[in-house]
Amino acid sequence: MAFPAGSRPYRVLVVEDDHERAQELRTLFAEDGYECEVTLDLDTAGEVVSERKMEAVLVDLEVDGVSAEEALAVFTPTENDQGLIFFNGSTDDTVQRRCRRQGADSYLSSRSGLQRVVNATCRAVGNAE
């Protein structure tokens, strides 16, 4: 992704407790020119977005103690002007539609590969601009 002259790269916050998956996501985002920060839980992620601007937040719903409802409460997209993407979520279409109606930009099931997750995040960043 090309950024305008003098601008900073887009920042993505990832809530992920699997170190290998987190490193792979960092690599994939870096290849697209994004800065990627990783936190292990929602509380820390909430602190990060209150301290600095993130263009998107990517939440792994397999992280212990994380639910889509809790993440929506922490990262209300209309209040924080950032994309919100869930991954490793339920394959239940009803859950996916409900989360999208409540403000998630994308809800990807556990069948989605990491490159698809990165692509959805990049699209959400474009929508949040």
Image (cartoon, rainbow, N blue to C red):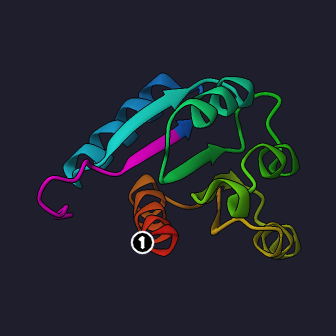
Residue 14 screen position, x and y as percent: 53, 39
The answer to if 7 sits in the magenta stretch is yes
The answer to if 68 sits in the magenta stretch is no
Residue 121 screen position, x and y as percent: 47, 61
Residue bounds of the magenta highlight: 1-13
Q: Residue furthest left?
A: 5
Residue 18 screen position, x and y as percent: 54, 27
Left or right: residue 31 compared with residue 78: left
Q: Residue at x 52, y 53 (%)?
A: 56
Left or right: residue 42 compared with residue 93: left
Secondary structure beneath dot 1 equals helix
How many numbered badges does the structure rendering display? 1
Q: Residue at x 49, y 43 (%)?
A: 53
Residue 41 screen position, x and y as percent: 69, 26
Image quarter in which the N terminus is found: bottom left
Q: Which residue is mark 1?
A: 126
